[in-house]
């Protein structure tokens, strides 16, 4: 007797200072472990990107955050692919030497990893990325010339037949900031993450293509006290390698009008969602809370937010750690109620008179 694939979604919101997943790909070990106990894992670049470090997971679907929200809402579906033609957008504001470093990464991905890239496009104006910090400490940002970005993507889609888009935007250097110092020490919020999300959201919302972003920055001075959680971003001149690897097999986004295929994935096939306990106000969580999806919240993964399932009236199972969450996934997949694995199984109660 065959069963449909067990599918889990793993979310760690961007730019909220998550204790796990708020740094340089430090949620990747969680994704690797979860992927071992599910058939399909849907997650996003903030979880899988580790700058020059990455780990290909055959059963993981690399989905940008806005697209992931739309999938959870049932508006879009996911169609797995064997490979994508990746189009590369470079911000006109990137200096010539730094631009060359990124082009060399693209060539290396083609020669060493065998990825398929189209010709690249330089935006017709500087994108003008600006960074912002909310009162909570969460980060966000803006781009001054979104039209320039969209014209570059349109050219790659139309002329180069790109099936996924990698964007490299020049981000402001802020070498002396306290936020950057804390982040490098593994204590603060990623100062770039919120603005990165704005870039990729815009592309996915407009074109319904897989997209991920890598910031272009000047190399930082060596710090002998660097936190291991931040270290992946300091290994070279670019964060682009993990983006290209992720996009190479990112699922295509499909609408309800698409001719259905057996491999397509829709919201009603998501069996479980794992999310930090204080970040339950996001669109994907709110959407899946209206379905049969088992929501698992992890209390150890503290963030700068404080929006819990209990506050929102969402039925969720709260666990302390990702290790415990993985145990819940195993039990849920097996059709075993988690309390059956404890000595505290309560007696069945009468519902009431008919």
Image (cartoon, grey):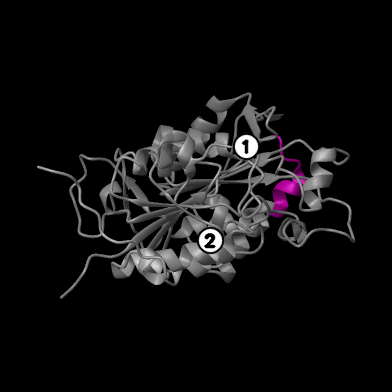
Identify the residue at image location x=59%, y=70%. Answer: 112
Q: Between 281 and 82, which is closer to the camera in this rendering?
A: 281
Residue 165's tag is none
Q: Which residue is mark 1?
A: 194
Q: Which residue is mark 2?
A: 245
Q: Between 253 and 96, which is closer to the camera in this rendering?
A: 253
Q: Between 253 and 268, which is closer to the camera in this rendering?
A: 268
Expressed as whole percent of the image width and height from the top left, the position of residue 68 reads 42, 44
Judge left or right: residue 51 versus residue 162: right
Q: Nearer the viewer, mark 2 or mark 1?
A: 1
Image quarter for residue 30?
A: bottom right
The span picked out in magenta is: 93-101
Identify the residue at image location x=63%, y=41%. Answer: 16
- All told, the count of numbered labels is 2
In the picture, the quarter occupied by the N terminus is bottom left
Judge left or right: residue 148 versus residue 79: right
Judge left or right: residue 280 versus residue 142: left
Expressed as whole percent of the image width and height from the top left, the position of residue 96 reads 75, 44
Q: Residues within 10 Å of mark 2 (few under 14, many from 20)?
A: many
Expressed as whole percent of the image width and height from the top left, the position of residue 176 reads 88, 39
User: Is 213 rendered above or below residue 80?
Assistant: above
Q: Between 121 and 143, which is closer to the camera in this rendering?
A: 143
Can residue 117 be seen in this snapshot?
A: yes
Identify the residue at image location x=84%, y=50%. Answer: 220
In the picture, the quarter occupied by the C terminus is top left
Secondary-structure class at tag 2: helix
């Amino acid at each position: 007797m065959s069963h449909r694939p067990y599918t889990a979604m793993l979310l760690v919101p961007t730019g909220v200072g998550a204790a796990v997943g708020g740094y340089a790909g430090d949620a990747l070990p969680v994704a690797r472990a979860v992927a071992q106990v599910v058939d399909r894992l849907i997650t996003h670049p903030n979880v899988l990107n580790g700058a020059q470090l990455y780990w290909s997971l055959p059963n993981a679907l690399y989905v940008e955050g806005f697209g992931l929200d739309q999938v959870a809402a049932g508006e879009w579906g996911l169609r797995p692919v064997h490979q994508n033609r990746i189009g590369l957008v470079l911000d006109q504001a990137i200096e010539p030497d730094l631009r060359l470093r990124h082009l060399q990464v693209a060539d290396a991905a083609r020669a060493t990893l065998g990825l398929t890239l189209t010709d690249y496009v330089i935006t017709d104006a500087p994108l003008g990325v600006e960074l912002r910090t909310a009162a909570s400490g969460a980060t966000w940002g803006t781009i001054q010339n979104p039209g320039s970005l969209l014209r570059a993507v349109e050219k790659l889609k139309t002329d180069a037949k790109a099936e996924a888009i990698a964007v490299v935007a020049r981000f402001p250097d802020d070498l002396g900031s306290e936020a950057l110092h804390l982040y490098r020490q593994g204590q603060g919020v990623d100062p770039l993450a919120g603005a990165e999300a704005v870039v990729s959201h815009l592309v996915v919302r407009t074109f319904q293509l897989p997209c991920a972003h890598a910031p272009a920055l000047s190399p930082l001075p060596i710090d002998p006290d660097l936190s291991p959680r931040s270290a992946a971003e300091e290994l070279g001149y670019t964060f682009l390698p993990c983006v290209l690897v992720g996009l190479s097999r990112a699922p295509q986004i499909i609408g309800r009008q698409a001719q259905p295929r057996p491999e397509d994935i829709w919201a009603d096939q998501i069996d479980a969602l794992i999310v930090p306990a204080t970040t339950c106000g996001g669109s994907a969580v709110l959407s899946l809370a209206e379905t049969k999806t088992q929501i698992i919240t992890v209390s150890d993964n503290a963030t700068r937010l404080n929006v819990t399932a209990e506050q929102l009236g969402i039925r969720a199972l709260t666990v302390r750690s990702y290790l415990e969450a993985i145990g819940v996934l195993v039990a849920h997949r097996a059709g075993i109620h988690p309390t059956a694995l404890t000595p505290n199984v309560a007696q069945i109660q009468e519902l009431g008179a008919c």
